[in-house]
Image (cartoon, grey):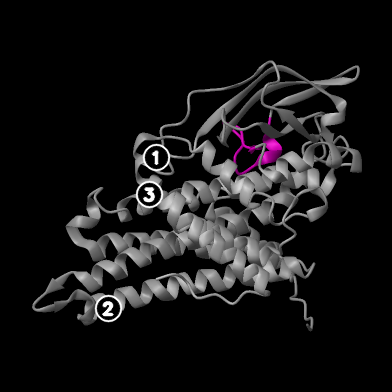
């Protein structure tokens, strides 16, 4: 059964209903086959762009939806409950637009944002490297100034939409300074020297292409630098808090989808003369699953509301990402258990949900990194803000 929601406006409630209907009509019938055949659904993102979903959390001035994060994240949930590869893709696209929205000049925004937020162009985000995942300051990809251009050389690992995106937000080193020597560039996919390796063969999210991007003397005009030289790590880290909320929402949606499947099966499957949901041992498992999903949703929306209010939310974003993804792993595992032997087959989607949940504890900062962020915040004595409506 769909999650019950309280939306801030009638408009946002209508938006959620529209997305829920779209997911049931367009995504649900295609998800299993696309995941089984590892097919990237590029047309789905075009349709979502036409619906206005790809630019939801950004200003209407440049083609965005002008929605608060509280609403945007619940849209992500509805998508991920049906097809988490698409939910992750929407979140990554929003993250790839973040640098331009928040650090671009007015001219850059007017020139590139409408197509990015309108869904004509799909984005990718290039931060990690083979030896620099949780430690982005260790990156080795370089950007050398050459007249009116920059020339980039290196490799970016684990790029969602790698080889499928229309533009790439790339972090590269412009000086040897560890933290202030990284800059941010917006690079079109057809730039000479920019290529994608063969996609990774993954355990889950197989409908979402992940590949290493190679930059072999990629020449881009200096106008494609976002912010100033040395702002790259600041841009990356600022965006990661929002990205973590996106993944928290996707994980919550995935867990909701697994719960819905488990509850439906428990109503239909009978043992000892009654539906298995009426057996206390299994009913309690389902109750714990529901509590886990509701807890993840509550934490994610709490962090989103802080962000919408302009308050610090970094610690809460890390908590939301950690709680939601750990809970998704537990809920999807329990969903397989509820279905028993059938849950272990590909005749039902819960085995896929379980495989997809695992990576959510890893990307956008592993959950060990989230614990580090949270504990450091506590050690510094960061205090909570008190505000009134």
Give the CA distance from mark 3 to mark 1.
10 Å
Q: Where does label 3 land, which residue?
A: 29
Tag on residue 283?
Answer: 2
> What residue is disc 1 on?
34
Asked if the magenta segment contains residue 47, the reply would be no
Q: Residue at x 61, y 61 (%)?
A: 73
Q: Name the residue nearer the viewer: 287 or 19.
A: 19
Q: Residues within 10 Å of mark 2 (few under 14, many from 20)?
A: some
Which residue occupies the foreground of this view, 292 or 250? 250
Q: Residue at x 14, y 72 (%)?
A: 270
* Image quadrant where one finds the N terminus: bottom left
Secondary structure state at the residue bearing disc 3: helix
Density class for disc 3 (Cα within 10 Å; few <14, some 14-19, many ≥20) is few
**Residue closer to the observer: 231 or 83:** 83
Mark seen at residue 130: none
Q: Position of residue 326 (x, y in %)?
A: 46, 61
Give the mark, 3 or 1, whose residue is nearer the N terminus. Answer: 3
Residue 167 figure quarter: top right
* x then y, percent, for residue 206: 42, 39
Q: Residues within 10 Å of mark 1 (few under 14, many from 20)?
A: some
Q: What residue do we see at 76% from left, 66% from top?
A: 312
Please, is residue 77 above or below residue 147 in the view?
Answer: below
Mark 1 → mark 2, Cα distance in angstroms:
33 Å
Name the main secondary structure of what is drawn in magenta: loop
Q: CA distance from mark 2 to mark 3?
A: 29 Å
SS state under label 1: helix
Region in magenta: 122-139
Judging depth in this view, the residue of 201 and 48 nearest the camera is 48
Lower position in the chain sequence, tag 1 or tag 2: 1
């Amino acid at each position: 059964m769909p999650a019950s929601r309280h939306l801030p406006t009638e408009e946002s409630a209508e938006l959620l209903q529209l997305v829920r209907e779209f997911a049931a009509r367009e995504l649900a019938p295609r998800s299993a086959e696309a995941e089984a055949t590892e097919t990237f659904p590029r047309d789905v993102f075009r349709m979502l762009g036409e619906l206005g979903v790809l630019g939801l959390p950004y200003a209407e001035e440049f083609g965005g939806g002008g929605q608060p994060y509280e609403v945007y994240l619940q849209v992500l949930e509805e998508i991920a409950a049906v097809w988490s590869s698409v939910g992750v893709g929407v979140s990554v696209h929003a993250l790839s637009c973040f640098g331009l929205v928040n650090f671009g000049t007015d001219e850059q925004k007017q020139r590139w944002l409408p197509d990015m937020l309108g869904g004509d162009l799909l984005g990718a985000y290039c931060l990690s490297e083979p030896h620099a995942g949780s430690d982005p300051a260790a990156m080795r990809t370089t950007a050398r100034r050459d007249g009116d251009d920059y020339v980039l050389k290196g490799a970016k690992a684990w790029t969602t939409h790698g080889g499928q995106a229309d533009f790439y937000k790339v972090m590269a080193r412009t000086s040897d300074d560890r933290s202030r020597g990284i800059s941010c560039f917006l690079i079109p996919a057809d730039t000479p020297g920019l290529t994608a390796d063969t996609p990774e063969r993954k355990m889950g999210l197989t409908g979402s292409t992940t590949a290493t991007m190679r930059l072999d003397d990629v020449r881009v005009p200096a106008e494609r630098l976002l912010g100033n030289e040395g702002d790259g790590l600041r841009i990356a880290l600022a965006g990661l808090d929002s990205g973590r909320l996106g993944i928290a929402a996707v994980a919550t949606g995935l867990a909701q989808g697994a719960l819905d499947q488990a509850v439906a099966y428990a109503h239909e499957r009978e043992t000892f003369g009654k539906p298995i949901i009426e057996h206390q041992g299994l009913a309690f498992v389902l109750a714990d699953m529901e509590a886990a999903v509701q807890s993840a949703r509550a934490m994610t929306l709490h962090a989103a509301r802080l962000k919408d209010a302009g308050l610090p939310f970094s610690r809460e974003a890390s908590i939301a990402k950690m709680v939601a993804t750990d809970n998704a792993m537990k809920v999807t595992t329990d969903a397989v258990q509820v279905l028993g032997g059938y849950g272990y087959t590909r005749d039902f989607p819960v085995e896929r949900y379980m495989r997809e949940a695992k990576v959510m504890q890893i990307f956008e900062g592993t959950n060990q990194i989230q614990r580090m962020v949270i504990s450091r915040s506590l050690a510094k004595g960061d205090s909570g803000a008190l505000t009134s409506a």
